[in-house]
Amino acid sequence: MKKQTMAEISSHKTQKAAKAFSRRTVLKNAAAAGAFAAIGPYLLTEEAKAASGELKVLIWTGYIPQSVRDKFEADTGVSISVTNYGSNEELLNKMKATKGRGFDIVSPTLNRRPQWEPLGLLQPWDMDRVPTDKVVAGLLKGSTDEWAWDGGIYHLPYIWGTEAMSWRTDMFTREYADLSYGDLWLDEMKGKVQGRPHSMMAGIGLYLDRIGELPSNRMIDAYTDEDNMRRIWTEITKFAVEHKPWIRQFWNDHNTQKSGFMQNGCVIGQTWDGPAIELKKEGKPVTYMAPQEGAFTWLDGLSIPVGAKNTDAIYEFLKVALQPDVGGMLGNETGYNPVAIGSADFLDEATKAAFQEAYPDDALDNLWWWPAEPVWYAAARAEFRDKFVAA
């Protein structure tokens, strides 16, 4: 019997914990929100009343809408300063440069734990102050299983979402049963595609695996060791470079995905759910859907840098963020998915409809959770990505 590597074990743990969750789980837990809401208005704790200064948050673009900022400030009396970023690499570089100082909360993605653990840039959560009963259990387990070291927990769930297929509905049509990452490379899409280089290449890997041209166990083999990774990604890179003329633009954050469709001539793309669903809900001719290979799925959390100053306000923000009505605000305004139990009761009908259209039939059972990334993986992937971008 083959001995599992640490990368395999970590990847399997991540996928097992995360697969326990879907929006269906939230709907099943909706009753819990009723009991919570019955308590009445949120009551300020003594810590919140005593907290002073400004809570400084470094987080993904759009993750704290103005309505959530207003709610936090009204409930706690603490002001909040939000600085945005567009990638995990940007966050890591910022924290390395400041040695974990300058912010009270940051938002790393679940699968990036191997890159954070050795850096010593985070401090553990005081789990006695965390309202764990307000978080969907499967997501909480993902964080507490993956981000546990030296006797502490360093990551708590905040928002989850996916990256899959989006397109201009006035220029392209496709049903779920036929939708594939391979549609990006149709002849008629030449010069009309947008995507993020490294995840678009992972999509190529899933597509080539599904059609039998590059077997990779749904790309999981690429995480077992560096030799396998390089073998698989060498073939992915050949395909990507050959199809570089299909690319209209590479996006690098939330807003460039939207402008790609509305200003820059993109017809189809591999994008996050949030930007495409925002456009869809605004009435723009854009839709979003998981393909047959599965939607790439991620969980972004909340972590405390070693240099955090406003400790009491950090825990007050957590309490506010995990209220089901605030989860509804996050779902309605970002296009991403909240983690608080009972949030589904506060989602508007347009958001619920967009979710159902994004994940029809068995799409939720076929989610592809990003595995934990060893440091060697991230470095090697950057080499292949750069070849694609420079081609």
Image (spheres, rainbow, N blue to C red):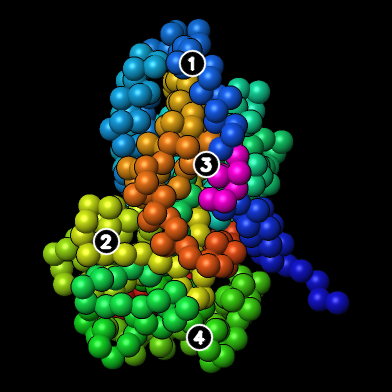
**Which residue bears the numbered disc 2?**
257
Q: Percent from the top left, x then y, of residue 322?
A: 50, 31
The correct choice, above or below, for 370 with respect to 323 in the image is below
Looking at the rendering, the stretch of residues picked out in magenta corresponds to 23-29
Question: Is residue 208 toward the left or the right of residue 79 in the image?
Answer: right
The correct choice, above or below, for 264 with respect to 234 in the image is above
The correct choice, above or below, for 245 with respect to 368 in the image is below
Name the residue nearer the viewer: 290 or 115: 290
Q: CA distance from mark 4 to mark 3?
A: 33 Å
Q: CA distance from mark 2 to mark 4?
A: 25 Å
Which mark is nearer the camera, 1 or 4?
1
Taking the spot 58% from the left edge, 24% from the top edge, the residue there is 35
Q: Secondary structure at mark 4?
A: helix
Amino acid type at circle 2 is: Gln
Amino acid type at circle 3 is: Val
Q: Percent from the top left, x then y, of residue 150?
A: 70, 38
Q: Earlier in the sequence, mark 3 or mark 1?
A: 1
**Which residue bears the numbered disc 1?**
40
Which mark is nearer the camera, 3 or 1?
1
Within-10-Å neighbours for mark 3: few <14, some 14–19, many 20+: many
Taking the spot 46% from the left edge, 26% from the top edge, the residue there is 320
Q: CA distance from mark 3 to mark 1?
A: 21 Å
**Which residue bears the numbered disc 4?**
208
